Image (tube, rainbow, N blue to C red):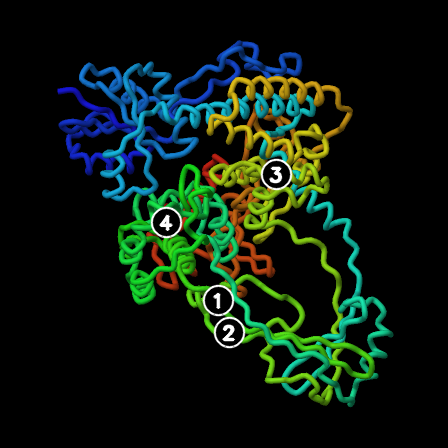
Amino acid sequence: MTKTLVLAEKPSVARDIARVLGCRQKGDGCLIGEKYIVTWALGHLVTLADPEAYDEKYKRWQLEDLPMLPEKMKLTVIKQTSKQYRAVSALMKRPDVSALVIATDAGREGELVARWIMMKAHWKGPAYRLWISSQTDRAIKEGFAHLKDAKEYDNLYYSAQARAEADWLVGLNVTRALTCKYNAQLSAGRVQTPTLALIVQREEEILAFQPKDYYTLQALFRDFTATFRDSKNNTRFSDKAFVEKAAEKIKGKTATVAEAERTSKKTAPPAAYDLTELQRDANKKYGYSAKQTLSLMQSLYEYHKVLTYPRTDSRYITDDIVATIPERLRAMAVGPYQKAAMNLAKNPILTKHIVNNAKVTDHHAIIPTEQSPDFSRLSYDERNIYDLVVRRFMAVLSPDFQYDEVKLRLECEGLSFTAKGKSVTSPGWKAFYSAADEDEEDEGENRSQQLPEIKKGMKLPVSGAKIVCGKTKPPARYTEATLLSAMENPSKQISDKNLKAVIETTSGLGTPATRADIIEKLFDNFSIERVGKEIHPTAKGKQLIRIVPDDLKSAELTAKWEQQLQNISRGKADMKKFIAEMRDYSTHLVSTVIASDAQYTHENATKDKCPLCGKYLLEVNGKKGKMLICQDRECGYRKGISQVTNARCPECHKKLELRGEGEKKIFVCKCGYRERLSDFSKRREDRGAGKADVMSYMRKQQKAQEKESGNGVMADLMKAWLEK
């Protein structure tokens, strides 16, 4: 009997599919059943070949060999996962395998994972596509009952192929050109460079900002306050004497209510989550990075099967999903959501705020599946992400938030004062959120005051006058939440009206699926660093933006590329034409870099020399602490010199930093607290933590440091402790 080979993207997904299909026999890199063989990739098993695969001369980085423009891009097997590739390739060549089902992630990158494996293994048989948005047993069964011909997704593959080749051509050529030209480890790309430019531009705006003092005047009444406005509607004034004079004028006087307006208003629910919106909220509320949120979402989708496909750019669902909503609500009606979900299941409110076929492309919004969660199996962080999605899902199915807004205008001694407040008449969808969860609204003027019943013409005594002093603030530095917004809507950084109109029709910088990786890449190559929640450009990042070709920094150009990739996926643009444009553009970038007279200096150079090549080491802030790295790209030496640990300061309770080497290791806190590692270990023992606890702690710290630097810098500490 012939069999159908099913290719999943990850082993966990393959196991779920195999269980549904009855494939229980273990094979080499696969699970075998009567009709199906289920195998898996490990992410990408095949990738575009490195430059040296085209010519030996590319092993050395030299300006004279640029640009690198292969006539035809080659594929190569990734060395680290070559064993699994060989297993998949062998399965494709089995005589009893007659068909293939692509069951990788239902998106652009998932399509590329499968197609490259198929191309490298020379698959010639029929291929079908499993396209599902959740990993529940029901979704898998329905998906296999409605398999599509893989040819229907050829354009999606062409888009993915075009993206990969464009990144190779632009990224590798400009990175090599910059690195060779300035003898520094510099990295650039068609999305990461415009993103870095946003961060550097914001830093320049902050540094150039000159704060100015301003003053506001508030009239105090028994139950509320009102703010002074001049004839031009200004509430902030730079002339302190003018404000002081106005304050003296109203003290002890009586104000007349000139206007009293009460208006009934309502606010519709927010749309359901797409990936970018979820990443923003997770960063705001929990401080999760975009990468971390995506990882947690992937686990909730693949392993726990309680949420739908994460890499979506849609915030709506289609008509065919509507019938499943009551079942989804009943499935999530556990724990704190039980009462609300069951009530909604009886009568969910379906409006254009959630159902809109026109606004759904490959995948609908992120919503709960028909599978109930087992909270005992969810980690703390997974629970937080699940909570965000569930509350948003219930909110979007709920009535509008309704309130009465009250606006007052009072006259006193020829001066005009205004006050406003609101009273909730029906909480609607906001019943699922606490006050702390809501976005800051109406900041400034009497944001949350409750106004009494006041009618026009009433006379109210002024009980006092208050002058509030303030300073104008520079624009805020980016957090990951606000950076994701800027990447999604770069039109805010564009002044040209025509270009703004173009950019507003594109997907912005990158896609929901790639933005997290772009941000992480900027951290990894030390172009940016975190200071608390804020993102700061490093000296390297600032210089890189100064020396990189101007048009590579352009949000407009990059967004146009993403628009073209989207058009390719929809069959509206030609992949070959796009790649030809990228080849020309790569040539232009290399020529621009070579012709530039800009200078680059290592502002973070230390007096320590690299033990491998003798060049001076650079001090950088890694994700887990300070590091020394060699300025020579080919050397690649790096060493951790301090590490932010999970140990807490006994005085201020902030995380301690571990510095020094060997027996001189010492914990240091920003508050000034210092403690030797040996004393720290003894304190843990005295507190009831034995050697096993300290060993466990050390292992965790070592893994974190090795992941950051590649060096086992804490091995000596482990050894010293075990020998005590």
Callout in the foreground (2, 4):
2
The answer to which image quadrant residue 465 occupies is bottom right
Residue 193 appears in the picture as rendered: yes
Rendered image: mark on residue 424: 2
Which secondary structure lies at badge 4?
helix
Rendered image: mark on residue 160: none
Asked whether the residues under the numbered discs 2 and 1 touch, taking CB atoms below 8 Å apart as contact, a structural biologist would say yes
Disc nearer the start of the sequence (1/4): 1
Neighbour class for label 4 at 10 Å: few (<14), some, many (≥20)?
Answer: some
Asked whether the residues under the numbered discs 3 and 2 touch, taking CB atoms below 8 Å apart as contact, a structural biologist would say no
Residue sitting at x 30%, y 26%: 128
Rendered image: mark on residue 195: 3
- Disc 2/disc 4 C-alpha distance (Å): 55 Å
In this view, the residue in front, 232 or 349, is: 349
Residue sitting at x 62%, y 66%: 442
Rendered image: mark on residue 695: 4
Locate the N terminus and report the quarter of the image it occupies: top left
Callout in the foreground (3, 4):
3
- Disc 1/disc 4 C-alpha distance (Å): 53 Å
Asked whether the residues under the numbered discs 3 and 4 touch, taking CB atoms below 8 Å apart as contact, a structural biologist would say no
Disc nearer the start of the sequence (2/4): 2
The answer to whether 360 is drawn above or below residue 350 in the figure is above
- Disc 3/disc 1 C-alpha distance (Å): 36 Å
